[in-house]
Image (cartoon, rainbow, N blue to C red):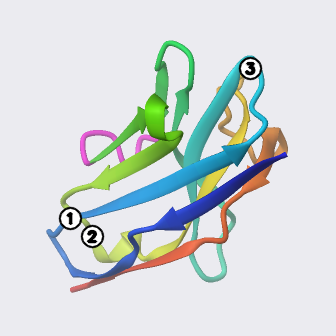
Amino acid sequence: QVQLVESGGGLVQAGGSLRLSCAASGRTFSNYAMGWFRQAPGKEREVLATIRWIGGSTYYADSVKGRFTISRDNAKNTVYLQMNSLKPEDTAVYYCAAGQWGPRRLTTTVDVGSWGQGTQVTVSS
């Protein structure tokens, strides 16, 4: 089981930036991947971006392409989400996730084996 600890959420004005971090510990496995999801009140949890640990292949949801960047630091077992040009509709609880890369590239919650505790991101207009 992988343990995930997130940091970096907060309150920001529209157009601003935030960077989320997620440190992983515990056993990893082949085809390991990490990613970021978010969940707004009354909405389903949605994938934002994922990254394959070996090779660094990435996936981005259309809603964040060009604004958000996922990256990893192998030495620190940490994944980051740089969020730029934030909009009020980006307000949500953001979750770090770990699981299998697989054909779906960790884009569905069923492929997630571990979740972080969640961090609130609030974008004011």
Q: Can residue 60 be seen in this view?
A: no
In this rendering, position of residue 75 left or right of residue 101? left
Q: Is the magenta stretch mostly helix, strand or loop?
A: loop
Seen at 67% across and 47% down, the residue is 25
Which residue bears the numbered disc 2?
Answer: 87
Depth check, mark 1 against mark 2: the one in front is 1
Gap between marks 3 and 2, in whole Å? 31 Å
In this rendering, position of residue 94 left or right of residue 29? left
Gap between marks 3 and 1, in whole Å? 31 Å
Depth check, mark 3 against mark 2: the one in front is 3
Which residue bears the numbered disc 3?
Answer: 102
Seen at 53% across and 39% down, the residue is 77
Q: Nearer the viewer, residue 110 or 99?
A: 99
Gap between marks 1 and 2, in whole Å? 10 Å
| Residue 66, magenta (yes or no) | yes
Which residue bears the numbered disc 1?
Answer: 17
- Residue 61, given in percent of the width and then of the height, sits at 47, 41
The secondary element bearing badge 2 is classed as loop
- Residue 42, given in percent of the width and then of the height, sits at 66, 81
The secondary element bearing badge 3 is classed as loop
Residue 68 against residue 121 in the figure, above or below: above
- Residue 7, given in percent of the width and then of the height, sits at 46, 68
The secondary element bearing badge 1 is classed as loop
Answer with the quarter of the image where residue 60 lies.
top left
Seen at 43% across and 56% down, the residue is 21
State the residue lying farthest toward the top: 55
- Looking at the rendered structure, the kind of residue marked 3 is Gly
Answer with the quarter of the image where residue 10 lies.
bottom left
| Residue 62, magenta (yes or no) | yes
Which segment did they paint magenta? Answer: 61-67
- Looking at the rendered structure, the kind of residue marked 1 is Ser
